[in-house]
Amino acid sequence: MEKDRKIAVLIDADNVSGKYIKYILDEISNHGTPTVKRIYGDWTKPDLGSWKAVLLDYSITPIQQYGYTSGKNATDAALIIDAMDILYSNNLDGFCIVSSDSDFTRLASRLREAGMFVIGMGERKTPKPFISACEMFKYLEVLAKVDEVSNTSSTKADKNKEKSGFADRNGLLRTIKTIVDDCSNEDGWAYLGEVGTRINKRYPDFDVRNYGHSKLTPLILSLKAFDVQSQKTSNPRVTRYYIKNQG
């Protein structure tokens, strides 16, 4: 089960603000337990002050890394070396790399080659190669609901607005139609859980919250291109949903 995963959370302090820490750890709890929590940066620099205030509160271990040479990112190197050390310890099941920097693309690929679950988190400016290298990728602005706070007057319009990243709304619609065709039964019905899994495999940055929804079913209904039906199971608290392409 996902809840049983032991995950190493490695944060690049140079590329992520301390205001996101609660949302980072809350999201990780949906996928496993953050067993190792480390953050990398040059803590002699005043611009990391936002992180210093939350490190103790969230039991995150700061790793000091001086910038020995101008123009070289020693912080990235330290994080990568630690990640490989943790990998070879064979004590964890996955990694969360928190950064908006493409320098971690090869690291994410290497960890996945080793059979690790890899989730990335970063801002919308994160380059696509790093996003694609992760099994899942979450936008920090979405986790923190920054858009809702900063622009409440346009929340309704934002739900219909194409989002940046791989899974824009029109592309998502076409992809779901293709997936339903691929995994549906003879009557055209596909299990929504399987559809969701396949969407995540194609779009690492897919998250229903990108479109103003908290669950997959309301998002599917909002696309107005699919029929949806529910089916009770032997467990009264569990309902299975199926979708079918319209037309």
Image: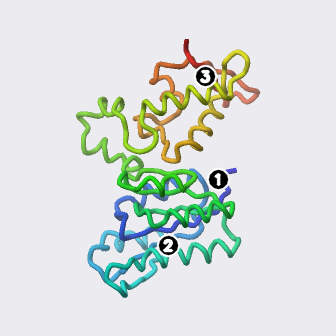
Residue 89 placement, left or right of 26 = right
Instruction: Please report whichever mark, 1 or 3, sits nearer to the chain's N-terminal start.
Output: 1
Residue count near mark 3 (Cα–Cα under 10 Å), binned few <14, some 14–19, many ≥20: many
- State the residue position of label 3: 243
For image coordinates 60% across by 67% down, the residue present is: 35
Judge whether residue 180 can be spotted in this image: yes
For image coordinates 42% across by 37% down, the residue present is: 168
How far apart, in angstroms, are the residues tagged by discs 1 and 3? 27 Å
For image coordinates 39% across by 70% down, the residue present is: 13
The disc labelled 1 sits on which kind of residue? Lys
Residue count near mark 1 (Cα–Cα under 10 Å), binned few <14, some 14–19, many ≥20: few
**Residue farthest to the top?**
247
How far apart, in angstroms, are the residues tagged by discs 3 and 2? 42 Å
- State the residue position of label 2: 38
- As rendered, which of 194 and 218 lies closer to the eye? 194
The disc labelled 3 sits on which kind of residue? Ile
Judge whether 135 appears above or below 91 on screen: above
- Any mark on residue 120, and which? none
Judge whether 233 appears above or below 54 on screen: above
For image coordinates 53% across by 47% down, the residue present is: 204
Element under label 3? strand
- The mark lying in front, picked from 3 and 2, is 3
Residue 41: image location, x then y, percent: 39, 77
